[in-house]
Amino acid sequence: MTIYENTQDTKPNPRPGTAPPPLPVFTHHDFWRGGELDLEAYLERVGLEGVTPPPPTLDTLVAVHRAHLATIPFENVHLLLDRPVPLDVPSLTDKMVRHHRGGYCYEHGLLLAAVLDRLGFTVTALTARVLVGAEGRPRPSTHALLRVDLDGGSWLLDVGFGGGLLEPLPLVDGYQVSQDGWDLRLDLITEVGAEEWLLRSFDGEEWQNLYSFSMAANLPQDYVIFNHYLITDPRSPFGNRLMVARTVGGTRYALTNTTLTIDRVGADRADPSGATLEREVRELPVSEVGKVLHEIFDIRLDQEERATVEDRVRGFLNM
């Protein structure tokens, strides 16, 4: 056995000393791809054509949020048609703007982020844990929402949740507001982390938890992963029922398979102690689902698409 020895002199490597400030982690910072958006077509779609582009002010933020929510519905029709749900800005624009369709939270969030980026706002993407129907059990943080920093304050935006806010909410602990009679409240809680926020709504009888969220930032690439999970996981609610929602001022419309629910707030709902909520529930024949999608939710399907959706609903209901 031969042993080779290193006869050369060796010197220890010098210690690096204090590290310099880190270089940027991302060399491409165009996260929201606002330049790929047809802004004029979007503003026309939501009824805000006329001033292009509107200035990045709070008034603009409120107007865009309200208009988007009232005109572009929450819906999962693409999944019932067995079509992919791409999240790039050109695909979102083609589907939700040019073809008068809606989408679910990732589609809404990324389309609105592109709009706000194009208008000059500072946007951060967040995720929330939906608490509706959870009965106290923790759920993954997969609901998409946005934060906008403006004039020294931060605002919560969410146009992809069926029963939430109409206008941006200031991120202020204990903030409570009535928006067209819908009562909402934000509170800081510490059940999960040092800064977890809870959004609640008043349903006419008691306060209901909607979702909780933190300030941890997300990128579109994160939403792509969440989107894949919600499309492919058999436990996801999006693939086993038709889900559509739209809020226009004090009226909320929701369609789950063939059950159409219409909630209207009373004039005295600004005071939760005397709030009124009128609820109308209709059971539709499957043959009317396509008609309701068009007339109430402004979802435009051709005859083949309408027939496919109605066939899927029949399957969900074992008809």
Image: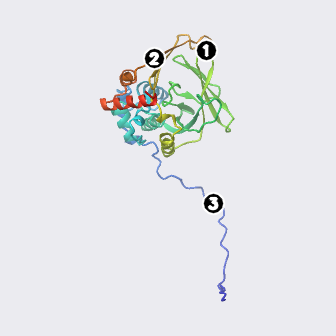
Q: Is residue 211 above or below residue 176?
A: below
Which residue lies at the image location 57% right of the left edge and 35% below the top edge? 128
Q: CA distance from mark 3 to mark 2?
A: 66 Å
Question: Which residue matches tag 1?
Answer: 272
Q: From this viewpoint, which residue is outermost toward the left?
A: 303
Q: Percent position (x, y) of residue 122?
A: 50, 38
Q: Would residue 108 be seen by someone viewing this image from the given angle?
A: yes
- The three-letter amino acid code for the residue at tag 1 is Pro
Question: In the rendered view of the protein, which quadrant contains the C terminus?
Answer: top left
Residue 48, which numbered label? Answer: none
Badge 1 element: helix
- Which label sits on residue 282? 2
Mark 1 vs mark 2: which is more N-terminal? Answer: 1
Q: Name the mark on residue 19.
A: 3
The residue lying furthest to the front in this view is 319
Q: Residue type at mark 3?
A: Ala
* Element class at badge 2: strand
Looking at the rendered image, the quarter that the N terminus falls into is bottom right
Q: CA distance from mark 1 to mark 3?
A: 57 Å
What's the amino acid at mark 2?
Arg
38 sits left or right of 152 in the view: left
Instruction: Please state the horizontal and vertical placement of residue 240, each as a whole percent of the image.
Output: 47, 34
